[in-house]
Amino acid sequence: MRRGAGAVALAAALAGGVAHAALFDDEEARKRIAETNVRLTQVQKQLEDRIAALEQQLKSQGLVEMFGAIEQLKADLARMRGQIEVLTHELGEAQKRQRDLYVDLDSRMRRLETANAPAAVVPAVPGAAGAPVQAVTATPPVAAGTAPAATTPAPAAPVVDAAAEQRAYDAALEQFKRADYPGAIASFGAFVKAHPKSPLAPSAQYWIGNAQFARRDFRGAIAAQRQLVQQYPDSAKVPDAMLNIASAQGELNENAAARRTLEELIAKYPASEAAGKAKQRLGVR
């Protein structure tokens, strides 16, 4: 009986020890799992922080590069603005020199044309001192009782006010020199309309075409210069007008037409200065 009780007590003691050991092992495992979770959380946070730092670093480097590119673009833009200002100034000076050259050439051509033009004859006033005496022509005797035939005096030639024409022409030319191209076109057009037979009319028509060209109205320039060629075919301005037509055609990318105009200019006016320029454009010697 005692042996049985002792055996039972021993078995109970052993069972209690095993249960305690199992309980200890389970707590230790949970503790280690919790520690591992903490470490994993810490490592994960460290990784996330590191990734965020790397991303921020990459973003910062991109911004730096972007800022550098922007600064470079600003510097390039400032340099280009300076170059544009220089080119604009040079273009203005070149246009002024071109206008002055045109005016100088026009003045010389005008002097030549005026020298070759016949002087205007002012009719003499009857009875005035120094007036030329008209020749007396013999008339057949009038029969008795017959009334003498009435004679119709010849109409007097209109008096040409060359000074007034010159003033009007010079005023229009001053408008062109001031780059008032619309005003110059209107003034030269009025001059040609009022004085179509004037020695200055071809030059006025030529300047209309030049003013249209300066306004980049190339169609208008071609029409104005063609009008000069048609209405004043014997004018010394015709070769220059044809050269201007070719320039306007070139600006319109009508290269074939421009070439034909230059070739026609060379063929018709080979000794003119405009023909020499036409040869240079065509590469002809």
Image (cartoon, helix red, strand yellow):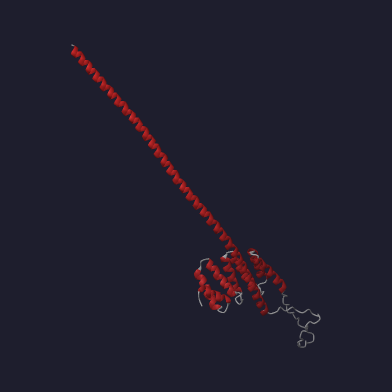
Displayed quadrant of residue 16: top left
The foreground one among 35 and 232 is 35
- Percent x, y for residue 263? 52, 75
Picture quadrant of residue 184: bottom right
Number of callouts in the render? 0
Q: Position of residue 164 (x, y in %)?
A: 72, 71
Q: Position of residue 142 (x, y in %)?
A: 78, 86
| For residue 179, above or below residue 285 | above
Which quarter of the rendered picture does the N terminus lie within? Answer: top left
Please give the name of the residue rendered at 32% of the width and 26% of the height, measured from the top-left corner.
27
| Image vertical order of residue 101 relative to residue 35, above or below | below
Q: Considering depth in this image, is 72 or 80 the residue closer to the camera?
A: 72
Which residue lies most toward the top here?
A: 1
| Foreground of the two, 9 or 222 | 9
Residue 71 appears left or right of 42: right
Residue 139, how many percent across, how many down?
76, 87
**Can the viewer see residue 190 in this picture?**
no
Residue at position x 24%, y 18% in the image: 13
- In-image side of 137 versus 8 (left or right): right
User: Is any atom of residue 49 visible in this view?
Assistant: yes
The relative height of residue 99 versus residue 78 in the rendered view (above or below) is: below
Residue toward you, 249 or 44: 44
Q: Please indicate whether residue 129 sits to the left or right of residue 65 in the image.
A: right
At x 53%, y 68%, the residue is 250
